[in-house]
């Protein structure tokens, strides 16, 4: 639960002289599902890496009054900043409950699952409800569906009481039903936390984003509501114009499907 906002200002990241992120600013508030989109290599994941301390960045990334840049990863986690990765990192051989226990900093032996449980810790119960995993308590994570694994990762952040959830391509590989469920769950989770989603799935973005920042070549190309971003000629040029065929094909749907089809036919 947080009232604070995440405010990123003039974030810069260089890799051996290559500017991956060249002065990016955006903010995210509780109550909104904030999206960061952009073509491959735009710098989206690098922004998250810098905010979470995995990569060194300059500029500023503040959670409320607290500067995150320059702090080690574990201290940023302790401040309540959690993230998921493009590939789910859960313990496949452990049950859902055991994964959540570990995330909560507890250790529960296998044998405890054989006993009648008096109940689950309220924070875990709540995380299970919020992610739709209540019925999967004793299921080994390895046999969860791809979507359920992503939800387990999100549940692990919730039991840690993360104030900020930075989610890197959470719906990649999910079925349409799983995407819809994920979007609805993120809307509920975002009521009391900061949720920032990095995504390639433009249909998902259109349905669930409150505000969007579009990155291109390490810079902010556009930001605003979905409607504002879709109407921005700069975005249309990058996704449908001269910025490259691969980008065009992958991102055409950032526009309304009919407009995208029309523009592509004209090319
Ligand atoms: N550790 C690194 N060393 C050198 N270059 C890197 C490193 N990490 C990322 N880059 C480069 O920085 C740029 C931005 O990469 P990043 O992964 O942030 O993009 P992205 O927008 O998340 O792309 P994608 O959607 O493909 O994941 C790319 O050109 C990438 O090759």
Image (tube, rainbow, N blue to C red):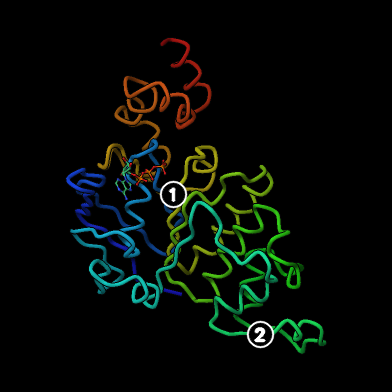
The image shows residue 91 at horizontal and vertical percentages of: 61, 67
Label 2 crowding class (10 Å Cα cut-off): few <14, some 14-19, many 20+? few
Q: Label 1: which residue?
A: 198
Q: Check disc 2 and report its element: helix, strand or loop.
A: loop
Q: Is residue 83 left or right of residue 139?
A: left
Tell me what residue is drawn at x 35 percent, y 70 percent.
Answer: 73
The furthest residue to the top: 266
* CB under 8 Å between discs 2 and 1: no
Q: Check disc 1 and report its element: helix, strand or loop.
A: strand
Q: Is residue 266 left or right of residue 154?
A: left
Front: mark 2 or 1: 2
The furthest residue to the bottom: 118
Q: Is 232 drawn above or below residue 116 in the view shown?
A: above
Q: Label 2: which residue?
A: 108
The image shows residue 56 at horizontal and vertical percentages of: 25, 60
Rendering quarter of residue 38: top left
The image shows residue 160 at horizontal and vertical percentages of: 50, 76
The quadrant of the image that shows the C terminus is: top left
Q: Is residue 117 left or right of residue 123?
A: right
The image shows residue 58 at horizontal and vertical percentages of: 19, 59
Separation of residues labelled 2 and 1 (CA atoms): 33 Å
Q: Is 135 drawn above or below residue 160 in the view shown?
A: above
Q: Nearer the viewer, residue 213 or 31?
A: 213
Rendering quarter of residue 141: bottom right
Label 1 crowding class (10 Å Cα cut-off): few <14, some 14-19, many 20+? many
**Of pointers 2 and 1, the one earlier in the residue sequence:** 2
Tell me what residue is drawn at x 61 percent, y 85 percent.
Answer: 107
Beta carbon at label 1 within 8 Å of ligand 1: yes
Q: Which mark is residue 101?
A: none
């Amino acid at each position: 639960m947080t009232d604070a906002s995440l405010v990123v200002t003039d974030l810069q990241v260089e890799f051996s002289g290559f500017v991956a992120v060249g002065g990016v600013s955006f903010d995210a508030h509780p109550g909104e599902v904030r999206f960061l989109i952009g073509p491959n290599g735009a710098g989206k994941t690098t922004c998250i890496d810098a905010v979470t301390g995995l990569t060194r960045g300059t500029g500023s990334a503040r959670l409320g009054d607290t500067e995150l840049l320059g702090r080690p990863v574990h201290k940023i986690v302790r401040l309540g900043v959690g993230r998921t990765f493009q590939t789910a990192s859960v313990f496949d051989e452990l049950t859902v409950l055991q994964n959540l226990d570990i995330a909560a900093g507890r250790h529960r032996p296998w044998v405890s699952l054989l006993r009648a449980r008096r109940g689950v810790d309220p924070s875990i119960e709540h995380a299970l409800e919020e992610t739709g995993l209540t019925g999967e308590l004793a299921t080994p994570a390895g046999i969860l569906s791809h979507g359920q694994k992503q939800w387990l990762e999100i549940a692990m952040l919730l039991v840690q009481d993360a104030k900020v959830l930075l989610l890197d391509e959470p719906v990649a590989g999910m079925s349409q039903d799983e995407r819809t469920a994920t979007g609805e769950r993120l809307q509920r989770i975002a009521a009391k936390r900061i949720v920032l989603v990095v995504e390639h799935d433009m249909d998902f973005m259109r349905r669930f984003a409150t505000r969007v920042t579009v990155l291109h070549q390490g810079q902010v190309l556009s930001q605003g509501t979905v409607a504002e971003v879709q109407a921005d000629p700069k975005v249309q040029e990058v996704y449908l114009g001269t910025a490259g065929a691969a980008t065009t094909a992958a991102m055409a749907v950032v526009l309304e499907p009919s407009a995208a089809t029309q523009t592509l036919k004209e090319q």
